[in-house]
Structures are given as structure tokens and as C-alpha cells.
Amino acid sequence: MEQNTNYPFCAIVGQEDMKRALILNVINPRIGGVLIRGEKGTAKSTAVRSLADILPERRQAAGCRFSCDPDDASFWCGDCRVNEDVVATGGRMRVVNLPVSATEDRVVGTLDIEFALKKGEKRFEPGILALANRNILYVDEVNLLEDHVVDVLLDAAAMGVNMVEREGVSYSHPSNFVLVGSMNPEEGDLRPQLIDRFGLVVDVCGEDEVEKRAQIIRYRLDFERNPDAFSEKFTQEQISLGEQISKAKKRLGGVMYSDACLEAVAELVVELGVDGHRADITLVKTAMTNAAFMGRGTVTKEDLFVASKLALPHRMRRKPFEEGVIDLESVYEIIGSFSGI
């Protein structure tokens, strides 16, 4: 594995929920992204930036500004669709950073209206959503973004397509990315309506076990002393995790669920008083993805437990700035009462 200066993903101590949420979204971007909330110094940015390093090389269309998948024409951009001979080349998933100061035009891209009117052709200047296609789009301090920009990001993440319309002229391109937002709640919160649209939300805090805190210090100092030597210790673990993720992607389409599974999810969200149906759908998608990651072909109660912990708490809020609290014992009891899962 090629060495780099990123801290190894597998060397992050603790924060298991955060790591699992990130991995599940890489396997299945249709989950809808993950919002990581927590105080400073809890490895939020470190985890996101190191995540791409564990993923193996992928195939992408040579010369395509959207890095289209040459093996999946259903998500090709307009240029690839008219190209009779799409040539494949190797590439890697990367992290695309979206600055807090980004304007809507910088995010979605711009259309040259004057050129379109004079020439009858569309000229599109790609934005961040174009760069993000088939990559990880990371928004640090997402709570400081303008609400309408967050709306645009969430819409594109949900549809996998970015649509730009100006003066009757429109242009669309694939924008299928893993959306990751991080924030420190002390600096302000997102509106509940926006938080609900993130597939998963994880709250992180500093480790309170002395041994783990000591290990974090030891690892960090060793990494700063010699990044290559430190990363080498985790090479095999990183490769193994990357292979597990690749296998999960291939397995995901064949994961099955029972009627009892759907009934358990429905009863769970009703009992917890969760509004709407987004929670139900996201919970099942997450459970299926976790099953694929663990090498299972069918959703189990364990998968539903994992998914509930990540997909439900932030949807139980009733007032702005009110923290969602989930009673895990009730979750275990409700799901455990169903047979056939």
C-alpha cells in the first residue's frame, strides 16, 4: 500500500460508532450520508480524511471530469453517453473538501447563458458537486453553512444527480457521493429539518478510559515522530478492511430481509414516536448494509440494533437544540420480540 501522511484509519482508538457509520456510507451512499457531532479533538476530521486511503483502486472513465464508472452506463454523464468508446483507467476515491464560505454557484457549478443563446450549445463550468461524484464530500463545520447550500447538498446526495437551471437552460450530471458533515454543537446547531435528512448521525466525545487515552497519546506521538514507520504497522489491517468493504459492495445487492424485519422496524419507530417515514427506510438500508459488511446475506436482529443506534436518535428530537435520547433497552426489547428475523 502506498504510504502517505494521513493518519491510518485503523489506528484510530475507540469511536466505533463513527467508524462504522463512515464505512457503511462508503459501502452504500444511498444511506444518505453521516453527520458527526462532537467536541474538538475527537478524530472527526482525521477519520474522514483517512477513510479513502483504505479503499482499493477503482475503474473510471479516462478523461471524464466526473470520473464516471465505465461499467455502469446508467450513471454516465452526457459526454460519456455520446462517446462511442469509453476507455477505462485506474483511479482512487478521494476526499473533496467543501469550504464553509462556498457559494451556491461554487457548489453546483455555473451555466454560460450568453454562450448558450448565441451558439445554441451548453457550456457548463463544473462545481464542487462535479468533483464529488464517486468520492467523499466532506463539509467541516457544516452547521456554519448557509441553509440553502445544505439543502442543495442533501438533495444531490439523495438523488445522485446535480441539476443546474438558469434562465430556462438546464444541465444535469451524476453526483453520487458519500456526504460527511462534522460540527461542534457548541458553535451552533443545524435546523432539525436538515439534521433529519442526514441518513446517520453520530455523537462523539473524548475517551474517558485511562488506558485508551494513554494509547491515543502514544499513537499520535509515534505517528508524528515517523509517519511511514507508524503507518506500516497498520498496513495489513488497512488492506483487510479495504477488501472487506469491496466484498460488501458486491454483496449488498443480494442481501435479503424478512417481512418480520419490516414489521419490527415499523413498530419500533411508532413506539419511539418518530415522525415521517424517512427513519424507517434509512434504518432498513443501514441494516442491509451492515449485514453485507459482516458477510451475511440476510438482515438479522444484530443489524437492526446497529442501524437503530445510528439512524434513530437524531430523529426523536421535538424542539430545536433538544437532544435526541434513545432507550436502547426498549429497542432491544421491541426487536427481540419478533420471530422470523
Image (cartoon, grey):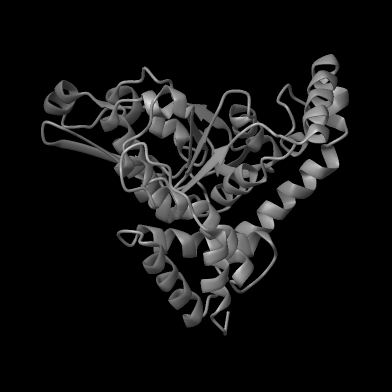
The quarter holding residue 270 reads bottom left
Locate residue 243 relative to residue 135 in the image: left or right: right
Residue sitting farthest toward the top: 225
Q: Who is closer to the viewer here, 9 or 5?
A: 9
The answer to whether one can see residue 268 in this image is yes
In this rendering, the answer to whether 255 lies above or below 238 is: below
Number of marks in picture: 0
The answer to whether one can see residue 251 in this image is no
In this rendering, the answer to whether 205 lies above or below 20 is: above
| Image position, residue 93 (x, y; %) | 59, 38
Q: Who is closer to the viewer here, 87 or 250?
A: 250
Locate residue 254 relative to residue 221 in the image: left or right: left
| Image position, residue 244 (x, y; %) | 72, 54
Residue sitting farthest toward the bottom: 340
Locate residue 313 relative to residue 126 in the image: left or right: right
Q: Going 55% across and 42% down the picture, which residue do you hit?
A: 60
Look at the image and tell me in which quarter the C terminus lies. Answer: bottom right
| Image position, residue 35 (x, y; %) | 48, 39
Look at the image and tell me in which quarter the N terminus lies. Answer: top right
| Image position, residue 190 (x, y; %) | 36, 34
Q: Going 59% across and 28% down the picture, which residue do you hit?
A: 45
The quarter holding residue 273 reads bottom left
Q: Who is closer to the viewer here, 70 or 214?
A: 214
Q: Who is closer to the viewer here, 311 or 11?
A: 311
